[in-house]
Amino acid sequence: MVGLPDLLIAPFHHVREAELPEGHVIHRLAGAIEDAFAGEEVTVTSPQGRFAVEAAHLNGSRLRGAQAWGKHLLIDFAAEGAHLVHIHLGLIGRFTVGPITPVHGQVRLRIEDAVSSADLRGPQWCRLLSDEEWEAVLSTVGSDPIRPDADPEKAWRAIHRSTRAIGVLLMDQSITAGVGNIYRAEVLFRHRIDPMTPGNRLAHATWQAIWEDLVVLMRRGVATGRIDTVRPEHTPEAMGRPPRLDRHGGEVYVYRRDGQPCLVCGTTVRRTNLAGRHLFWCPRCQRRHR
DNA sequence: GTAAGATGCCGAA
DNA sequence: TCGGCCTCTTACA
């Protein structure tokens, strides 16, 4: 493992920016929830009403902690019976943590104390689970490059025996957890891998390099709250080009850059649909099959 | 394997 | 005002 910065202790107290729900966002949220509420008795409500019974069960109990596994967020309350709130933001869910604000919009879940409030809107899932139910969910979650306890060899075994494309396998949350459409496209570009390469054609050393890169990139995302994947020589400053201005923010090689010239070779970046998602890649740079 | 649907928000019209 | 989306599930070929 090369030069892993110690980023998991970054300050998170306020997480308010519109963030992209890939794994790094969920880890940031877990950190923000812990910074704001861990160890405290909190008020739990469901202003929108769709989590009202569960919120009432938790209201006034102590928030023990929050953790992320891939794109899953788990908040642990010291309450009787089912006491784990399992949240998945899906595509459009938003969770904001910061100083107390008035409730606005469809707030499914609000956690608050005297100074902070956390509001969850539009989640794919927000449900109350027992320990056993959570264990069942966790058993389906793959290796998360952000977690220190992740096992990249477990992911490798699934990749190595699969004929599916590596561009699909990286997005399979039961194999690599937390990798989304941006990290998928970018890590394959950085290693010059053809996204259509079957998993069983990939060399073990290539997988190890991809994994170590995901660890670095995704932990950087946890620290900064954005996805930046370009190497120093390809930054806007180094290349004298304008910075990316869309709401995705970070500097990337291929994600949503279809029709524009590749930052490395100038070839037009392409887009296609792979397993129902847009895949972006440079057909010249990405020819490796091992 | 492909398509539609869920939900909040942004930015293109 | 409306389409697309950084995700995932369900239904069907």
Image (tube, coloured by chain):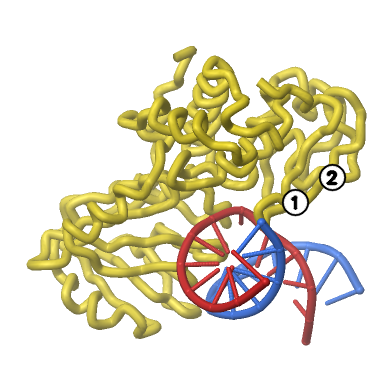
Chain colours: A yellow, B blue, C red
Q: In the figure, A86 relative to A198: above or below?
A: below
Asked if labels 2 and 1 touch by Cβ distance under 8 angstroms, the answer is no
Residue A238 visible within the image: yes
Residue A244: image location, x then y, percent: 77, 42
Query: Given the image, what chain letter belongs to the residue carrying mark 2?
Result: A
Mark 1 = which residue? Answer: A246
Residue A5: image location, x then y, percent: 45, 21
The quarter of the picture where residue A187 lies is top right
Pick the residue in front: A273 or A108: A273
Query: Given the image, what chain letter belongs to the residue carrying mark 1?
Result: A
Q: In the figure, B12 relative to B7: above or below?
A: above
Q: In the figure, A198 relative to A289: above or below?
A: below
Circle 2 SS class: loop
The quarter of the picture where residue A252 lies is top right
The quarter of the picture where residue A113 lies is bottom left
Residue at the limit of the structure toward the left, as seen here: A80
Circle 2: residue type: Asp
Q: Quadrant of the C terminus of chain A?
A: top right
Circle 1: residue type: Asp
- The 10 Å Cα crowd at callout 2, few under 14, some 14 to 19, many 20 or more, is some
Decide if residue A276 is on the left or right side of residue A62: right
Circle 1 SS class: loop
Q: CA distance from mark 1 to mark 2?
A: 14 Å
Residue A87: image location, x then y, percent: 37, 61
At 40% from the left edge and 36% from the top edge, which residue is drawn? A143
Q: Earlier in the sequence, mark 1 or mark 2?
A: 1
Residue B7: image location, x then y, percent: 53, 77
At 37% from the left edge and 66% from the top edge, which residue is drawn? A100
Decide if residue A124 is on the left or right side of residue A57: right
